Image (spheres, rainbow, N blue to C red):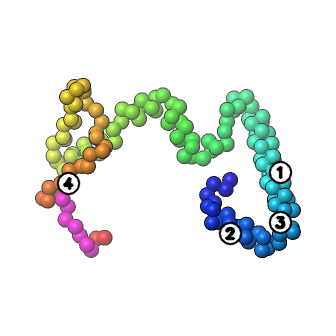
Amino acid sequence: MFNDIGALELVTIVVLAILIFGPEKLPKVIQDVSGVIRKIRAFSESAKQDIRTELGPEFKDFEFEDLNPKTFIRKQLNENEDLQEIRSSFDLRKELNEVTDAVNGTEPAAAPVPASTGTTTGPDLLKKPAAPAAEQRTPFDADAT
């Protein structure tokens, strides 16, 4: 719950709590706050359990974290075998290079063939792409930016 609070912020909160509530009342306030947090968590868990029972047995594996769109998409991409196959066969960089070559009217570059295997592989993402020649670069227009 407090994963993003650093040490300085925590010290600031403690000092402010001591100044506001005083050292005599601070243990009681901490006890009350922790009790409220415990009750909220228990209420939340019972509500989740009620929703799961109302949805029925086909939703027994339902997780509320899956309602987050990023989590849902990530889970679907990792679990669905058809999507994994499509994802592994699709090379976005190659596709973009082909589209760029088609727009520029140049011949598409042949994929490099490693000497050891004799088959084509994906692009080497660790290499920097070569800078285009000066005549291929688009002129910089300061007024357009």
Looking at the image, is mark 1 or mark 3 earlier in the sequence? 3
Say what secondary structure mark 4 lies in: loop
Say what secondary structure mark 2 lies in: helix
Say what secondary structure mark 1 lies in: helix
Gap in angstroms between the C-alphas marked 2 and 4: 51 Å
Say what secondary structure mark 3 lies in: helix
Looking at the image, is mark 4 or mark 1 earlier in the sequence? 1
| Figure quadrant of the C terminus | bottom left
Query: Disc number at residue 39?
Result: 1
Identified at 63% across, 54% down, the residue is 3
Disc 2 and disc 4 in contact, CB within 8 angstroms: no
State the image coordinates of residue 134 (x, y, percent, origin top left): 14, 59
Looking at the image, is mark 1 or mark 2 earlier in the sequence? 2
Residue pointed to by mark 2: 12
Residue pointed to by mark 4: 131
Identified by mark 4, the residue type is Ala
